[in-house]
Image (cartoon, rainbow, N blue to C red):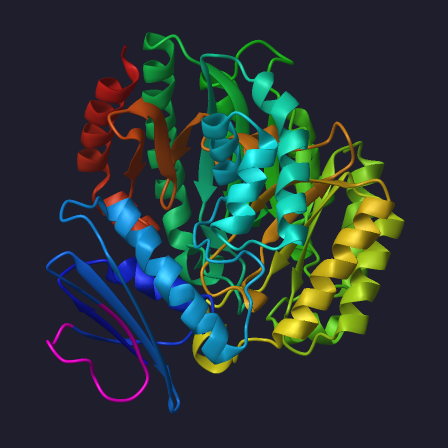
Amino acid sequence: MVIHTVGHARTYEMEALLKLFRPAERFDFSSEPEIPAGEVLSAVLADGHLTCVTRIGREELCAETDVPADIPNNLLDRTLSSLLYPQLCALTGLRPAWGMLTGIRPVNLLRKFRERTGSLAAAQSEFRDVWHVTEEKIQLASDILAVQQPILDAAPENGVGIYLSVPFCPTRCKYCSFVSNSVAQMGRLIPDYLQCVHREMQLVSQIIDECGLRVDSVYIGGGTPTAIDLYQPLDWIDRYLLPEPGSLREFTVEAGRPDTITRENLAVLRQFGVTRISVNPQSFQDHVLKAAGRPHTAQDAVDKFLLAREMGFSNINMDFIAGLPEDTVQGFRGSIDRAVALSPESITVHCLSLKKAADFYQSLAMPEPAAVSEMVAYAQETLTQAGYRPYYLYRQKNMAANLENVGYAKPGFESPYNVMMMDDSQTILGIGAGASTKVLGGRRGIERLTECKYPYDYLARFDGLMQQKERDLRALLKK
């Protein structure tokens, strides 16, 4: 399909809208004066007049409206969507559950609408009438909003979150699009990587102290952090970043894959006061795990969960993915039922997302939307009946059924880091390759700083990266 634009440059918004109906499809682009032949999504702006055309198969729909000559981009995006979205619905027969919302943080958007309108009901009406969000998703976002509010209110005024990236895994899972490097192939980089992380941590600690900030939460992710020896980075965190004992609201390590979890590394996590870990089965169906490139069994995940319990971890999360190849609705239900029987403190339900960096992107078609929708609905009903509450939500590109990822937690076990990070309500200071920093209060409201995605680039450019990071952070954080 061709995305055709004339008289404006809002191609990204048109592509994001089209992906709601055709996820993981590659599109061609045209800016020729005439609308191309074949299937097309076209928006032509000329002399204050916007004309939108959608052609799928032999059917074509057209809509047009006048717009101000100086219309800002955000309003032009909304106008484009309001004309093209009904055409796409009519020609495809699809009605996306999140309507024409294309952003990753719909709960954050609902909160902003509530603040602007002064009432939740008015914000819900905007979701319903302007953005065409279904009642089910409006209610889900509203429920999460209510759970998040006390967590947001409890955040210290000068608090920051710390994210430490450990971009190494034993092997790469086929659905993974994160920056991760096989220990077998890139393990030689780990000693140098840790030394650079040490230096970056010292720099971040110095700036935190100078700016009068306080570390509110620490999250170590990846990759699979437990694929490497974490003693040194945990010791450095304890030495440079942690305030007095017990002052953190959360200290999470994504233990993640059961094949990396041992009694020894769990003991190290306990030694340094880690309060929350993840043991992520993704599925409790062995044939599904094999198809996804997960080198462990369902029983391995159960065994490592029970080991963590035995060693005193009282806040454990489990992740599952709806839409994995070879999974079925019945199989996914079985996975959720087994997780509930284990009773972890939180369970996160993801929908498969086919991104270009994942092995599945080239080889796998999108899963059947109806099946994924049924999986997600079953998880929501089962988990809420078992006493879990949805507490954070985000969306990704190319998601199965264009749904969402939702974290469910027992009351009191919600992850403050996840809430603050997804709501853009706290400065997050990233450390390491692939980590990103976002600082609240910049000229644009939120300033984002990114480092090299890959460890070898991070190591090669480290001195220059740190000089730039120091300049940027001092400029953004010093009042």
Q: Quadrant of the N terminus?
A: bottom left
- Using the image as rendered, state which of residue 200 and residue 350 is in the foreground: 350
Residue 309: name its quadrant: top right
Instruction: Tell me if 383 is positioned left or right of 255 in this view.
Output: right
Q: Position of residue 279 (x, y in %)?
A: 70, 48
- Using the image as rendered, state which of residue 188 and residue 154 is in the foreground: 154
Question: At 45% across and 28% down in the image, what residue appears?
Answer: 116
Q: Is residue 24 above or below residue 438?
A: below
Residue 191: name its quadrant: top left
**Span of residues in magenta:** 31-43
Instruction: Tell me if 362 is positioned left or right of 76 in this view.
Output: right
Question: At 80% across and 53% down in the image, what residue appears?
Answer: 381
Please check the rendered image and state whether residue 447 is part of the magenta-colored stretch, yes or no.
Answer: no
- Using the image as rendered, state which of residue 282 and residue 76 is in the foreground: 76
Name the magenta segment's main secondary structure.
loop
Q: Is residue 305 visible?
A: yes
Q: Is residue 454 above or below residue 238?
A: below
Question: At 81% across and 45% down in the image, what residue appears?
Answer: 384
Question: At 53% across and 69% down in the image, what residue appears?
Answer: 174
Q: Position of residue 60 (x, y in %)?
A: 36, 83
Q: Quadrant of the C terminus?
A: top left
Q: Position of residue 467 (x, y in %)?
A: 19, 29
Q: Position of residue 365 (x, y in %)?
A: 52, 80
Identify the residue at the far right of this view.
341
Identify the residue at the far bottom of this view.
58
